[in-house]
Image (cartoon, helix red, strand yellow):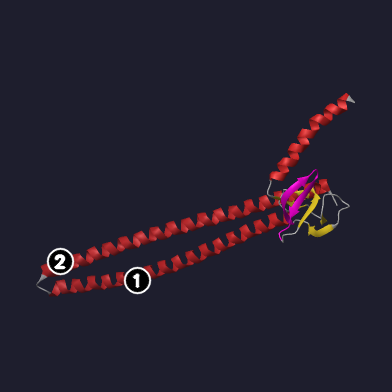
C-alpha cells in the first residue's frame, strides 16, 4: 500500500503538469475519424450542445480533470475529453499547405520562363539593330574608299573615316557587352530552374515523409470515440 501511494504521489504531479502544458496551447485539433458531441458540463452524461468533426480546430478555455472546455470556430462552447484532441496538424492540412507551396513554385517558374522569353526577344532585336548598323558602316567604308580615290580633300575624308571606325568599335563593344549580359542571364535562369527543380524534389520528399509518418501514427492510434 505504501509503494502504491508513493507511485500515485509521483505520477499525480507529472499528470497535472502534462495537462497544464496541454492547456497552455491556444487550441487543438479533433483527432482523425472522430465526430464528437460537445457537452454542456464535464461528463459523458451531460447534455450535448453541439458537434465537431475530425480536424476541426478548437480553442481551449477551461479544464476540469481530463475534460476541457473548448470553443468552435462558429463560437459554440462545450466540454469534451482531452483524449479526443491533438495538437498535431491534420494530414489534410499539411497536404493542403504543401500543395499551396508547390503551386507558388509553379507560378514562380512560369514567371521566370516568361521573363526569359522577353529577354531573349529583346536580345534578338538588339542583335538585328546592330547587324543593320554593321551593314551601314560597311557601306560607309566603301563609300569612303571611293571618295578617297576621287577626292583631293583626303585629310577631311580621313577624319570622317576615323569617326566611323570609332563608332564601329563602340557598337562592337556594345554588341560584346550585350552578348555577355545575355549569357549571364541565361546562366542565371538555368541556376534558378535548377534550384526550383531541387525545391520540388525536396517538397516531394517532405510530403512523402510526412504522409508515411502520419500513416504510421494512424496505425498506432487506431479509432477512438
Q: Kindly give the residue lying farthest to the left in the view shown.
A: 152
> Would you name the residue on which mark 2 appears?
159
Q: Is residue 151 above or below residue 170?
A: below
Estimate how packed mark 1 is, as few (under 14), some (14 to 19) or many (20 or more) residues with alpha carbons within 10 Å: few
The residue lying at 33 percent from left, 72 percent from top is 132
Question: In the figure, is residue 93 to the left or right of 177?
Answer: right
Tell which of 201 and 53 is nearer to you.
Answer: 53
The residue lying at 84 percent from left, 58 percent from top is 48
Is 44 within the magenta? no
Tell which of 12 and 209 is nearer to you.
Answer: 12
Tell which of 182 and 149 is nearer to you.
Answer: 182
Rendered image: mark on residue 129? 1
Query: Which x, y percent locates residue 185?
Result: 44, 59
Query: Which x, y percent locates residue 50?
Result: 80, 60
Q: Which residues are magenta?
A: 56-73
Estimate how packed mark 2 is, as few (under 14), some (14 to 19) or many (20 or more) residues with alpha carbons within 10 Å: few
Is 71 within the magenta? yes
Query: Which x, y percent locates residue 203?
Result: 64, 53
Query: Which x, y percent locates residue 220?
Result: 82, 45
Q: Secondary structure at mark 2?
A: helix
Q: Is residue 13 above or below residue 109?
A: above
Tell which of 186 and 64 is nearer to you.
Answer: 64
Location of the N terminus by quadrant is top right
Amino acid at each position: 500500500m505504501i509503494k502504491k501511494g508513493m507511485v500515485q504521489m509521483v505520477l499525480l504531479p507529472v499528470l497535472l503538469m502534462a495537462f497544464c502544458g496541454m492547456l497552455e496551447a491556444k487550441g487543438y485539433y479533433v483527432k482523425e475519424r472522430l465526430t464528437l458531441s460537445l457537452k454542456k458540463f464535464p461528463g459523458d452524461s451531460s447534455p450535448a450542445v453541439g458537434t465537431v468533426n475530425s480536424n476541426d480546430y478548437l480553442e481551449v478555455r477551461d479544464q476540469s480533470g481530463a475534460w476541457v472546455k473548448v470553443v468552435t470556430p462558429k463560437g459554440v462552447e462545450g466540454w469534451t475529453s482531452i483524449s479526443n484532441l491533438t495538437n498535431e496538424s491534420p494530414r489534410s492540412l499539411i497536404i493542403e499547405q504543401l500543395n499551396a507551396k508547390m503551386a507558388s513554385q509553379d507560378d514562380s517558374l512560369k514567371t521566370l520562363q516568361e521573363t526569359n522569353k522577353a529577354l531573349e526577344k529583346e536580345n534578338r532585336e538588339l542583335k538585328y539593330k546592330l547587324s543593320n548598323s554593321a551593314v551601314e558602316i560597311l557601306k560607309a567604308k566603301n563609300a569612303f574608299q571611293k571618295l578617297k580615290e576621287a577626292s583631293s580633300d583626303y585629310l577631311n575624308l580621313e577624319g570622317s573615316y576615323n569617326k566611323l571606325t570609332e563608332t564601329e568599335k563602340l557598337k562592337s563593344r556594345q554588341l560584346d557587352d550585350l552578348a555577355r549580359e545575355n549569357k549571364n542571364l541565361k546562366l542565371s535562369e538555368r541556376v534558378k530552374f535548377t534550384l526550383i527543380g531541387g525545391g520540388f524534389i525536396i517538397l516531394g520528399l517532405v510530403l512523402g515523409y510526412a504522409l508515411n509518418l502520419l500513416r504510421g501514427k494512424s496505425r498506432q492510434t487506431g479509432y477512438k470515440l
